Every structure is written in C-alpha cells, then in structure tokens.
Image: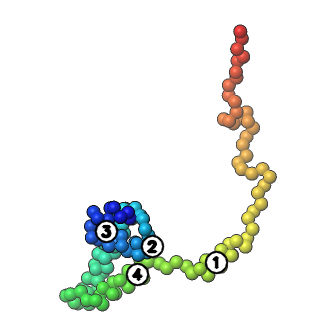
Amino acid sequence: MSSDNVDELPKEAKIMSLILQAQAIEDCDKKVVNQLLDFAHRYTVEVFQDALIYSEHAGKNDLDVEDVRLAIQGRVNHSFTTPPSKEFLLELAEERNSTPLPLLPEKFGIRLPPEKHCLTAVNFQVVPEVC
C-alpha cells in the first residue's frame, strides 16, 4: 500500500497494511486490504457463532476460552486444507511425465473439404477494366 494513502485509512486497515508489510509486501491495491479485512471479519464472526453454539450445548451461559479454542479448531479442520507435500507432487509429476507424448502426424489439425466448398474460397470474379 502506498504511503500517501495510509494517513486516511481506518485503524483496522492500517493494521492490515502493517501485517502485509511484515510479510514483505511493500505495495498492493487498496482492494486487497479491504478483502483481507472482510475475510477477517467473516472468520471472526463465524468462530464466535460456533463458540456460542458449543457453549449452549455445554449448558453454559457465558463464552469460555475453551469454547473459542474448540470453534477455531473446528474451523481449521474443516475450512482450510494443507497443500500436498513436495515429495508427493514430485512423485506424481514423475509418474505423469514417464509416459511419452503422442507423435504428431504429418498432417495435423482439422481436415477441411476442398477449397471450392469452403467459405475461405474466392467467391467473386474481377472484371477487367475495359478502356
């Protein structure tokens, strides 16, 4: 985010910009910060809603730290996936790349009918100019 726009941003957007800068992201579109703020808000609301459900199920009137931890754990287990390991991807790539590509025929592409039957043929005649 450019430094001239930072002064007019709300506090939360400034904090999000600082988080991005801490991750070595020097410049980004203003929409990126807004999208990250929207994601953070939705995630927080969903975690607290889940924590309230867990608290009610346990018969408690107030939220507890354990309810929030359980809600976060539930969100992490079901919302976010970990990427496959590098070894697995290398093994998969080696397996896929072991089969050779098919050879290209001498005449490749779509076969067209003779030129007189195609729309690419000349469909007019030029009359020579008589003086």
Where does label 4 land, which residue? Answer: 76
For marks 3 and 2, the one nearer the N-term is 3
Query: Which image quadrant: the C terminus?
Result: top right
For marks 2 and 4, the one nearer the N-term is 2
Q: Residue at x 78, y 50 (%)?
A: 107
Where does label 1 land, which residue? Answer: 90
- For residue 57, side relative to residue 116 (left or right): left
For marks 1 and 2, the one nearer the N-term is 2
Q: Residue at x 38, y 63 (%)?
A: 2
> Residue lying furthest top in this view?
131
Q: Quadrant for residue 128, please give it.
A: top right
Residue 14 visible at all:
yes
Rendering coords of residue 50 (x, y %): 30, 81
Residues at marks 2 and 4, CA–CA distance in whole angstroms: 25 Å
> At label 3, which amino acid type do we have?
Ala
Residues at marks 3 and 1, CA–CA distance in whole angstroms: 40 Å
Residues 19 and 98: in front is: 19
Check disc 4: other Cα within 10 Å, few if <14, some if 14-19, many if 20+: few
Rendering coords of residue 25 (x, y %): 44, 70
Where does label 3 land, which residue? Answer: 13
